[in-house]
Image (spheres, helix red, strand yellow):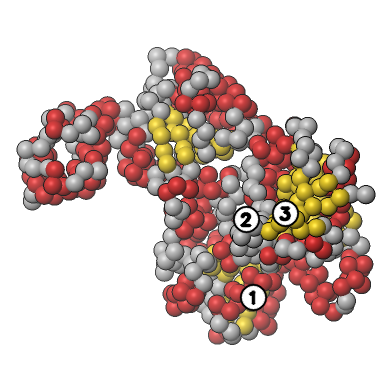
């Protein structure tokens, strides 16, 4: 799938209610208190909905940065 | 849909209801869908604790509503089915205690749904202590409880699961990652269902369904194809329309009023009613019929006058997009749903997008069932009224009025009247069944109901007054618009005074609070001999009367 970091940042920032400028490709769950475990699940749900994909349970814990999410989407 | 979700969604944020959401699964992701409320979430699976402790979140704060969404499958994920059933029992008794101790809080609770497949496979249906059998029993107890307390409204999630199927609604990856059982679709549907249940609980549903005829109630054009030529039958396209009629007929049994607004000759329409035996709706099912060649906007205005109901309580169905557009532009308060272009989609669309969306009810009262009959009798009375003078008219009605004071059996009806009456309503104070029950139980307040009948039949409980004997005030006084102008309003006021006098009061205070709709009530106290003490800038009037 052809996905850019801007697409992913749009989803993540919307879920966390934060401005898109706060994010870069390197942004990860450690950078934002809002990106906690529940926040992460909500991000994954929003990614599933936006791109019509299923994230496997065992993958979910690894996709905790913008870069990882972009990489995951590019592979499907 | 042209005009969508006008009712709760466009309120300003401060007036949104404060809602506490409790569950045995992680409901936090519903937040983005819950636009109609200001939600607070309990901790995951703390619903029993929150309901059991007097000092907890549920008891401590004042919530407009508490949503308790219990997932049946999750409840029964215990080692033994009996343990799970015992937790269910405990939940219901805590729920009962909460509803009784916090009568002013609305509780919106889910019924339980059974898992699709269990380890018992087919035997699940045959054994007494199966998960499904326990769930059925717990649901029966919830139903019984909702009839016993005044503030519990129930939602059956099957309304959603049977429409979409659990495969689309469950989310095994997020369930195991963080106890999020439901998909975004399920959260959206649950949010909608709880919103509509809350709306139904507050009696804020629409009241009138106005129908076009050609290609709406039957297929084809009556004026061209004749009463036996239009499509209305037990098979094919004709059955789509016959099924729609069947569903509409069911709505009349729960108090929704029907009216016709159609470009047709009235004689053709009457012929259709009398000659086509496939018509499930009869002429008497309609409280008013406008079949003519004038503009449908004008017809709707006249229907609103004839039925004494505001246009904001109207839903208008018409297959013609031009007519819909015209009505939507000129009468923005009327709901005008987009009508399906394929006849086979009509019945399901009608149930989901019209009945559930605009006519939700959480329980049905005996008065609701009688309503259409009452309204059409009313139009008979109206025509009688035009022909004779007022006094002779009133006399000819043989009006009989009975007063019922502090009846705990009529709490729901009393509340419904405070919620629904807009025109002849002196203070427009809205009360829930629980608040009415509190008044009845108290020494200070008396709740008076007026039971009306005349020679045309019984209107039932159609007037209400609430007096505060401590402060000598008339808190509420209202009459259903069906019986305004019959001279009974003064009788109700005298009854209120009598009860205040009986409690030792002589100087009676009464108030008129103006709203957009209660002009018919303005000036009533002056006419009844009360003195105007003061009038505020907002138009509120304070009256006094000294009893002899």
Residue A68 in the figure: left or right of residue B18: left
Tag nearer the camera, 1 or 3: 3
| Residue sitting at x 38%, y 28% | B25
Which residue, given by chain and number where applicable, does mark 2 sit on? B250
Task: Give residue B435's position: percent from left, percent from top.
Answer: 66, 38
| Residue sitting at x 74%, y 66% | B376
Mark 2 — on which chain does it sit?
A: B
Which residue, given by chain and number where applicable, does mark 3 sit on? B542
Q: Under tag 3, what secondary structure?
A: strand
Tag nearer the camera, 2 or 3: 3
Q: Quadrant of the N terminus of chain B?
A: bottom left
Same chain check for tags 1 and 3: yes
Mark 3 — on which chain does it sit?
A: B
Q: Is residue B358 above or below residue B146?
A: below
Q: Is residue B60 visible?
A: yes
Q: Estimate the spatial distance between the alpha carbons at disc 2 and disc 3, rounded to whole Å.
A: 45 Å
Mark 1 — on which chain does it sit?
A: B
Q: Is residue B318 visible?
A: no
Task: Give residue B389's position: percent from left, percent from top.
Answer: 88, 76
Nearer to us in this view, B47 or B129: B47
Nearer to us in this view, B332 or A53: B332
Same chain check for tags 2 and 3: yes
Task: Give residue B28's position: percent from left, percent from top.
Answer: 34, 34
| Residue sitting at x 10%, y 37% | A27
Answer few, some or many: residues within 10 Å of disc 1's Cα (few below 14, many 20 plus, some between 14 and 19).
some
Q: Estimate the spatial distance between the alpha carbons at disc 1 and disc 2, rounded to whole Å.
A: 25 Å
Task: Give residue B501's position: percent from left, percent from top.
Answer: 88, 42
Which circle's residue, 2 or 3, is located before the other in the chain? 2
Which residue, given by chain and number where applicable, does mark 1 sit on? B302
Where is residue A29, by image quadrant?
top left
Q: Estimate the spatial distance between the alpha carbons at disc 1 and disc 3, rounded to whole Å.
A: 34 Å
Residue B172 in the figure: left or right of residue B510: left
């Amino acid at each position: 799938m052809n996905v850019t970091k801007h697409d992913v940042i749009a989803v993540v920032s919307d879920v966390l209610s934060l401005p898109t400028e706060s994010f870069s490709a390197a942004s990860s769950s450690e950078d934002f208190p809002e990106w906690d475990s529940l926040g992460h699940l909500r991000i994954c749900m929003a990614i599933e909905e936006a791109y019509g994909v299923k994230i496997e349970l065992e993958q979910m814990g690894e996709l905790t940065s913008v870069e990882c999410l972009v990489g995951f989407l590019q592979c499907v | 849909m042209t005009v969508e979700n006008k009712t709760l969604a466009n309120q300003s944020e401060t007036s949104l209801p404060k809602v506490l959401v409790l569950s045995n699964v992680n409901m936090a992701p519903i937040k983005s869908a819950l636009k109609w409320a200001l939600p607070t979430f309990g901790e995951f699976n703390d619903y029993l604790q929150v309901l059991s402790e007097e000092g907890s979140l549920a008891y401590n704060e004042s919530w407009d509503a508490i949503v308790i969404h219990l997932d049946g499958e999750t409840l029964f994920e215990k080692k033994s089915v009996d343990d799970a059933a015992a937790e269910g029992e405990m939940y219901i008794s805590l729920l009962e205690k909460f509803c009784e101790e916090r009568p002013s809080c609305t509780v919106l609770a889910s019924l339980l749904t059974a898992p699709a497949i269990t380890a018992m496979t087919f035997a699940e249906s045959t054994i007494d202590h199966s998960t499904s059998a326990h769930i059925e029993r717990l649901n029966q107890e919830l139903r019984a409880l909702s009839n016993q307390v005044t503030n519990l409204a129930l939602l059956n999630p099957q309304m959603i699961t049977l429409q979409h199927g659990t495969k689309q609604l469950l989310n095994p990856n997020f369930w195991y990652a963080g106890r999020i059982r439901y998909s975004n679709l399920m959260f959206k549907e649950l949010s909608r269902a709880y919103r509509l249940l809350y709306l139904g609980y507050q009696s804020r549903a629409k009241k009138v369904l106005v129908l076009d005829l050609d290609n709406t109630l039957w297929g084809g054009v009556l004026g061209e194809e004749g009463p036996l030529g239009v499509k209305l039958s037990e098979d094919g396209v004709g059955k789509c329309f016959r099924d729609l009629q069947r569903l509409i007929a069911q709505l009349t049994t729960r108090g929704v009023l029907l009216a016709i607004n159609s470009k047709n000759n009235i004689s053709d329409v009457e012929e259709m009613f009398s000659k086509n035996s496939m018509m499930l709706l009869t002429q008497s099912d309609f409280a008013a019929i406008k079949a003519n060649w004038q503009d449908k906007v004008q017809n709707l205005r006249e229907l609103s006058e004839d039925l004494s109901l505001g246009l904001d309580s109207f839903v208008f169905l018409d297959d013609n997009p031009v007519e819909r557009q015209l009505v939507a532009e000129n009468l923005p308060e009327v709901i005008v749903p987009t009508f399906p272009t394929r006849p086979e989609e009509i019945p399901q669309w009608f149930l989901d997008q019209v009945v559930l969306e605009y006519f939700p009810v959480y329980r049905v009262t005996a008065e609701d069932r009688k309503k259409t009959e009452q309204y059409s009798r009313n139009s008979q009375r109206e025509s009688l009224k035009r022909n004779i003078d007022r006094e002779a008219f009133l006399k000819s009605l043989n009006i009989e009025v009975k007063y019922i004071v502090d009846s705990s059996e009529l709490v729901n009806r009393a509340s419904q009247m405070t919620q629904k009456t807009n025109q002849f309503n002196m203070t427009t104070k809205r009360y829930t069944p629980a608040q009415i029950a509190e008044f009845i139980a108290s020494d200070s307040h008396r709740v008076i109901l007026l039971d009306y009948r005349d020679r045309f039949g019984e209107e039932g409980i159609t007037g209400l007054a609430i007096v505060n004997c401590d402060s000598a005030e008339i808190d509420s006084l209202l009459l259903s618009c069906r019986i305004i102008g019959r001279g009974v309003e003064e009788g109700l006021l005298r009854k209120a005074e009598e009860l205040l006098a009986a409690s030792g009061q002589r100087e009676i205070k009464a108030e008129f609070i103006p709203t957009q709709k209660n002009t018919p009530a303005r000036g009533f106290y002056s006419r009844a001999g009360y003195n105007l003490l003061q009038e505020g800038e907002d138009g509120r009037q304070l009256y006094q009367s000294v009893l002899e």
